[in-house]
Each structure stands twice: as structure tokens, then as C-alpha cells.
Image: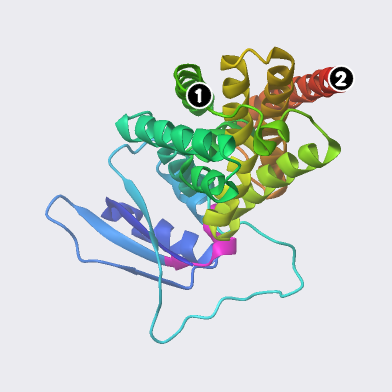
Amino acid sequence: MRICEIIANKKYKRILKTIAEKQGAIDFWWSSELEDGRQIYTMVVTDDARQSLIDSIQVLFEDDKEAKILILPVDASIPRLQEDKDKNSDIKSKTTREELFEQVSKGINFNINYVFMVILSSIVATIGLSEDNIAVVVGAMVIAPLLGPNLALSFAATIGSKKLAISSLKSLIIGIALTLGVTFSISFFSDINSLSNEIISRTKVGLGDIVLALASGAAAALSMTTGISASLVGVMVSVALLPPAASFAILLANERYEMAAGALILLLINTVCVQLSGSLTFICQGFRGRTYLEREEAKSGLTIFMSFWIIIISILIASALYVN
């Protein structure tokens, strides 16, 4: 449930009231007229009706750049507002396209905090992998910021946002590059164990690894759209990305090229699988562009995106079988 607050000219009162009634808003009210001739219109809307209501309002204000639409959370209400729920229904999205866009955009901000998080997680992962300390490796998975760019890229492909896709791809590439650089430097200038069980286990690709990556991507997407706790899912996705990246850099620094190739293939397969299953999950959740043009562009781009990843996965699996 959300509060949708609209700040717009008083002339929109009648049509906004009609939209609220037609889209099934639980409640609707407005403020007195402000000094500049605008009013604040407030709607309480259920999760199921929220996207269609916001789409209708956006169409109304397509040419009005002065209007503002704010989406606010409802933590509790007194008396309690009941939403109609079908216990036997499929899992549905509890967020809107616009809310999810803002959420994933925050995860791709390339700033000093992102850089430090990548560096710190790489240091922790290097130590944990070399010492066969699974608890330390899990710690690196928790702080690794690689989840955001992956989900953002999947979502960008789903709705056809080129700007979001470029930004998320940039953050993802830089994040992985930083991980490789930091881990390689530590391994090259220090005497660490490059043949620990944790590292060796990530030099071979099996069916279980592919299934894990696909499940991680799907679970991560579900966590953002249905309100499931994102912390556990973040760990799942990091399992598929950070350890093989660190293992590849450690082995490369110690000139164990054949084993490093296996870790690199695992990293690439997991990254691609997360992208693919994430996009499929967003599609199944019903996310798409708002306008007809956006949907057509997204459809075309998504076809290319899916085809490319499927081809890459096939090549990587073939490479993994050859290396193994």
C-alpha cells in the first residue's frame, strides 16, 4: 500500500477524482488552494492498483512539467486498512516501475563509497579464500556491492532504458575490474596460499554452479519486487560473482593460468546467468515500458539482449567443458 501525492493546478481536481475512483483508490482527498493556484491531491492505493493509477496520472500530466507526483510508503494505519488478497494467487510485484527504477539507480552510483566497498570486499575475500576461512568469505559476500549493477542492467533491458543500461554496465565493469586489480596486487606482492580448497573449488564449472547463478538472479529480482528481505539475496548473488573473480586474480598473480581460466569462465557464466534470470523474472512480474514506443523499443532490445546472453552462455559452457 502506498500514498500517491500529486501537486498540480486546481483545474485537475475533477479528472483526478475520476482517476482515483476508476483505478480503485482506497481514499482520495485534496488540500485547500495554494498561493500559486496549485493543490495537493492525495490518494491511498493498493499494491495491485498502484502501477495502473500512476500510469494514468502520468498520461494526464504528459505536457505539464510543473506537476509533481510523489510516491510515499504506508508503514501502518489506524484504523487498519485491509487490502483484498487472494492467498492462492501467484507472486505479484509490490512495487511500480518508477519505484524500482529509483531503487536500482541508487545501486549503480559510482562514487567514493562504491569504490571503497569494492576494495574492502576484495581484501576480505582474498584473505578468506587463501586461508580457507568460509566465514571471512561470507563476510566479503555481504559487503560486496556487485548486486546493484547486475539488477540494474537486467531491469534496464526489461524496460528498454539505454541510459540506465550504460550506467549499470559501467558500474559493473569498474566493480569487477577493481576487484581483480586489488586481489591481483595483494597476491602478487605477498605470499598467500593460491591452492586453498576454497580457491580450487572455483576453478571448475558444473551444472550446479549454473543453476546457482540462475537461482540467484531470479531471487534477487524477486526480492526487489515483492518485498522479500534483500540481505539474504544479496549474499546469494555475491556468492556467484565475488569469489570466482578473486580466485581468478589470485591464480593469475601466481601464474597458474590453466586454473585461472577455469575461475574466469565461472565468473563470466555466473554473471551472464544472473543477468538472464533477472531479466526473465522482471518480465514475469509484468514490468515493461509505459508508452507504446517504449514497449516496442524494449521488446526489440530485449530480444537482442536475451539472444546475446544465451549465445555467450553456450560458448562459455563449451569452454568450461574443454578446460575441465
The amino acid at mark 2 is Ala
Residue behind mark 1: 191
Q: Which mark is residue 22?
A: none
The way the protein has been coloured in the rendering is rainbow
CA distance separating discs 1 and 2 = 34 Å
Q: In this rendered view, identify the residue nearer to me: 57 or 198.
A: 198
How far from the left and from the top, in percent, is residue 49? 57, 61
The amino acid at mark 1 is Asp
Q: Is residue 4 above or below residue 263?
A: below
Left or right: where 157 falls relative to 230: right
Q: Residue at x 43, y 32 (%)?
A: 118
How far from the left and from the top, in percent, is residue 156? 57, 32
Image quadrant assignment for residue 298:
top right
Q: Which mark is residue 318?
A: 2
Residue 62 makes an appearance in the image: no
In contact (CB < 8 Å): disc 1 and disc 2:
no
Mark 2 surroundings within 10 Å by alpha-carbon count, few (fewer than 14), some (14 through 19), many (20 or more): few
Q: Residue at x 80, y 20 (%)?
A: 311
Residue 218 makes an appearance in the image: yes
Image quadrant assignment for residue 264:
top right
Label 1: element kind: loop
Q: Residue at x 65, y 34 (%)?
A: 196
Q: In this rendered view, identify the residue nearer to me: 83 or 102.
A: 102
- Quadrant showing the C terminus: top right
Q: Residue furthest front?
A: 191
Q: In this rendered view, identify the residue nearer to me: 260 or 207.
A: 260
Looking at the rendering, the stretch of residues picked out in magenta corresponds to 44-52
Q: Is residue 134 above or below residue 289?
A: below
Q: In this rendered view, identify the residue nearer to me: 77 or 238.
A: 238
How far from the left and from the top, in percent, is residue 56? 51, 50
Q: Is residue 284 magenta?
A: no
